[in-house]
Image: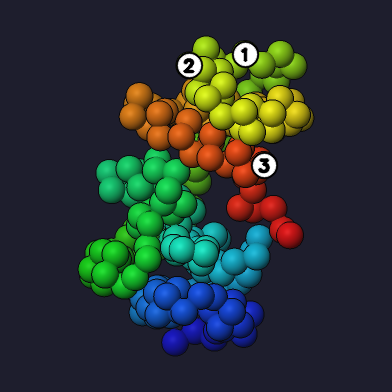
Amino acid sequence: MANKDARIDLYISKSADFAKPILIHLRKLVHSACPDVEEKIKWGFPHFDYKGMMCSMAAFKQHCAFTFWKAPLMKDKTLIVNAESEAAMGHLGKITSLKDLPSDNKIISYIKKAMKLNEEGIKIPKKKPKTVNPEIVTPDYFLKALKRSKTALVTFENFSLSHKREYIEWITEAKTEATRNKRMETTIKWLAEGKPRNWKYIKS
């Protein structure tokens, strides 16, 4: 088994009790599928590299997440659907216990697909840079939802242009109406709590 990074041991030890067995199990599967994996801490949470970035795991207050760096190229519908869910924060869905995980064989097959992509040097196509428009248009349906929560509305109005754009783009880029409505619901909740779109990644 490849060398382990002591920082990941520390990360796991500081995680919530429910998260520890999940993180330990996922880590074990990564090493089982990829003996030459290299452990690292990036952006504050565990990453597993193999000929480049491969996958990562993280623990939050009430769930864990596992993410594949090149999931869009792995051509698996389940991974893409889970990534579309704002509640999941990862490609294996919202993990609250070991029971929420796919079978070990399935996870290992995902890891091997991710390994192969890195071995072959296949890269995610670069997205064309978006034209930054200083003017942002708040959709009417979003404004109506905002007006139902005075706290959320005040927070949104006081946000910087970039913070407003993050929420609006997240909502308007939803591929289905159901996803859009769910994102609006989450947005109103987070705004009422005074949170920007990417609050989970802001170090306290």
* Residue under numbered circle 2: 141
Q: How far is the residue under mark 2 from the one under mark 1? A: 12 Å
Q: Earlier in the sequence, mark 1 or mark 3?
A: 1
Depth check: give the residue in front, 62 or 202.
62
> Which amino acid type is shown beneath numbered disc 1?
Val
The type of colouring in the image is rainbow
Q: Is residue 8 above or below residue 57?
A: below
Q: Residue 65 appears at what percent x and percent y? A: 45, 60
Q: Is residue 168 left or right of residue 163?
A: left
User: What label does residue 194 carry, if any?
Assistant: 3
User: What label does residue 52 carry, if any?
Assistant: none
| Residue contact at pointers 1 and 3, CB within 8 angstroms | no
Q: Using a 10 Å C-alpha cutoff, classify the residue at mark 3 as few (fewer than 14 neighbours), some (14 to 19) or many (20 or more).
A: some
Kindly identify the residue that appears in the image at 43 percent across and 48 percent down.
87
> Would you say residue 116 is visible in this rendering?
no
* Residue under numbered circle 1: 137
Determine the secondary structure under disc 1: loop
Closer to the eye: label 2 or 1: 2
Q: Is residue 159 above or below residue 43?
A: above
Determine the secondary structure under disc 2: helix
Where, quadrant-wise, is the C terminus in this rendering?
Answer: bottom right
> Which amino acid type is shown beneath numbered disc 2?
Tyr
Q: Earlier in the sequence, mark 2 or mark 3?
A: 2
> Which amino acid type is shown beneath numbered disc 3?
Gly
Closer to the eye: label 1 or 3: 3
Q: Is residue 157 above or below residue 15?
A: above
Q: Residue 31 appears at what percent x and percent y? A: 42, 78
Depth check: give the residue in front, 168 or 9.
168
